[in-house]
């Protein structure tokens, strides 16, 4: 019995264990993935709902944005520009918010006519400013021109002369009356200088000054009147009673043919007045030049030799004969003449002729040294200064050469040779703008073909 009881107890205990195991299994089952999965079966629906809501919101925002972008285009037309401000506000209130009105209205509704009216005062101010600046420039140039005119800087030096300043004014204002009158004042000053030259018997200088006056003011009536008066005087000899009058009438005497007017008998009237030695000397040179122009160089040399032998102080004739000897490369005759004339030649003339002889012998440095020694005494000697400027150029001292050519132009007039010398010096210094202007001022009418060709080439090269 006890065995049976033990078996029954074991069976009961096993059943209780099985029941406990079943309970544990049920608990585990409750915590298993199957039940867990059934607990969360509503999550996909929620997610889908959220996605749909988000898509709806995105679509709504997209449509609203499109409506905002299309709003200005749908209502902007030429007529819209003329709508009253109250009507404009009502249109924008119906289609957009307040911020949209503020941002879009200024960009779309831009009236064109009022802007053009606002720009007009700006243009007017700019024009007035330009005119004021131009008037200031003209006033300054007029002051410079008056100063240059007072200093007799009529057309030279190249960088500071009255003609240049008046030309600049006329470029800015072609009808500027003070500048037009200034040109005539320059021409009038040249006429005054021509009158002085005529009274001094410098007939060549008279013509040069008249040409400058015509170049500055071609339409100035006083120039033609002066020429007519000069022509009348030279073509109609007048009786003279003084030696000064004889000197002033040298142009008339020089016009008489050489063969029929011996120097000793060169009298413009029947009065028994003996010409001065200086006047005879000057007329001898004029006759020699006339023979040279006719191609009679030997006759000119012979006439000068005879005159020098018969007169005590034939300065001009001796200088002219010396020049002819040098041109003919007769250096020995030039040296002997220089020795003979040493007693009566002025210091500057003797120095210059010595330098010419040294130059002919190829001694340029020695010639330059000789000229520099007496330069202070030769300030008014044109030929001396011209030779000095040329020798500076030969010595490659271009700055000094340019300086002396400028002084020649200022003191002795605008001669082509001086403009050419200045142009060459400035060209060598690579001052291209000034060199170009100097080349353009050269009168090439009487220049040799090779000179004309060279000047044309340099002008073309410096103009680019």
Image (tube, rainbow, N blue to C red):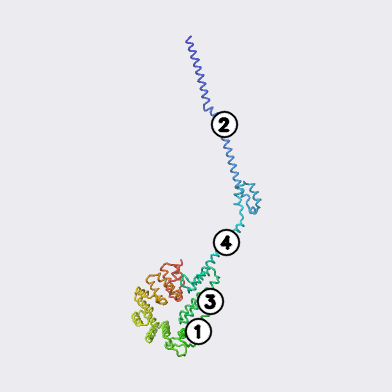
Q: Label 1's element?
A: helix
Of label 1 and label 2, which has the lower sequence position?
A: 2
Of label 4 and label 3, which has the lower sequence position?
A: 4
**Residue identified by numbered label 2:** 42
- Circle 1 residues within 10 Å: few <14, some 14–19, many ≥20: some
- Circle 4 residues within 10 Å: few <14, some 14–19, many ≥20: few
Of label 3 and label 2, which has the lower sequence position?
A: 2
**Residue identified by numbered label 3:** 220
Of label 4 and label 2, which has the lower sequence position?
A: 2
Q: Label 3's element?
A: loop
Query: CA–CA distance between discs 4 and 1?
Result: 60 Å
Of marks 4 and 2, the one in the foreground: 4
Q: Label 4's element?
A: helix
Residue closer to the observer: 332 or 50: 332
- Residue 233's tag is 1
Please, is residue 237 above or below residue 360 in the view?
below
In which image quadrant can residue 428 be found?
Answer: bottom left
**Residue identified by numbered label 4:** 125
């Amino acid at each position: 019995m006890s065995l049976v009881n033990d078996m029954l107890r074991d069976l009961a205990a096993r059943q209780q264990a099985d029941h406990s195991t079943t309970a544990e299994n049920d608990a585990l089952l409750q915590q298993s993935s199957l039940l867990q999965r059934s607990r969360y079966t509503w999550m996909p629906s929620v997610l889908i709902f959220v996605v749909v809501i988000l898509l709806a919101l995105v679509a709504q925002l997209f449509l609203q944005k499109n409506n905002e972008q299309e709003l200005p285009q749908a209502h902007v037309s030429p007529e819209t520009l003329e709508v009253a401000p109250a009507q404009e506000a009502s249109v924008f209130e119906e289609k957009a918010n307040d911020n949209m009105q503020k941002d879009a209205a200024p960009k779309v509704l831009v009236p064109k006519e009022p802007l053009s009216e606002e720009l007009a005062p700006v243009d007017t101010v700019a024009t007035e400013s330009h005119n004021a600046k131009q008037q200031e420039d003209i006033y300054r140039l007029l002051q410079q021109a008056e100063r240059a005119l007072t200093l007799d800087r009529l057309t030279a030096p190249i960088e500071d002369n009255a003609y240049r300043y008046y030309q600049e004014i006329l470029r800015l204002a072609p009808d500027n009356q003070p500048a037009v009158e200034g040109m005539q004042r320059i021409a009038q000053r040249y006429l005054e200088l021509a009158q002085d030259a005529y009274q001094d018997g410098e007939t060549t200088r008279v013509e040069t000054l008249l040409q400058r006056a015509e170049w500055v003011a071609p339409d100035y009536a006083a120039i033609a009147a002066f020429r007519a008066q000069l022509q009348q005087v030279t073509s109609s000899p007048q009786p003279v009673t003084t030696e000064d009058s004889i000197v002033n009438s040298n142009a008339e005497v020089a016009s008489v043919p050489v063969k029929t007017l011996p120097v000793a008998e060169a009298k413009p009237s029947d009065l028994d007045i003996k010409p001065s030695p200086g006047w005879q000397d000057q007329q001898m040179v004029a006759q020699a030049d006339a023979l040279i122009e006719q191609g009679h160089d030997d006759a000119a040399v012979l006439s000068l030799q005879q005159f020098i032998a018969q007169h005590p102080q034939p300065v001009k004739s001796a200088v002219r004969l010396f020049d002819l000897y040098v041109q003919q490369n007769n250096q020995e005759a030039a040296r002997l003449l220089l020795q003979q004339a040493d007693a009566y030649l002025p210091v500057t003339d003797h120095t210059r002729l010595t330098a010419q002889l040294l130059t002919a012998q190829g001694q340029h440095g020695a010639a330059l040294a000789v000229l520099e020694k007496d330069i202070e005494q030769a300030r008014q000697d044109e030929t001396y200064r011209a030779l000095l400027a040329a020798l500076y150029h030969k010595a490659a001292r271009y700055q000094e050469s340019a300086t002396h050519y400028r002084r020649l132009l200022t003191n002795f007039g605008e001669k082509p040779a001086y403009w050419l010398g200045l142009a060459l010096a400035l060209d060598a210094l690579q001052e291209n703008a000034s060199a170009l202007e100097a080349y353009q001022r050269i009168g090439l009418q009487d220049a040799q073909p090779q000179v004309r060709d060279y000047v044309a080439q340099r002008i073309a090269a410096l103009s680019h």
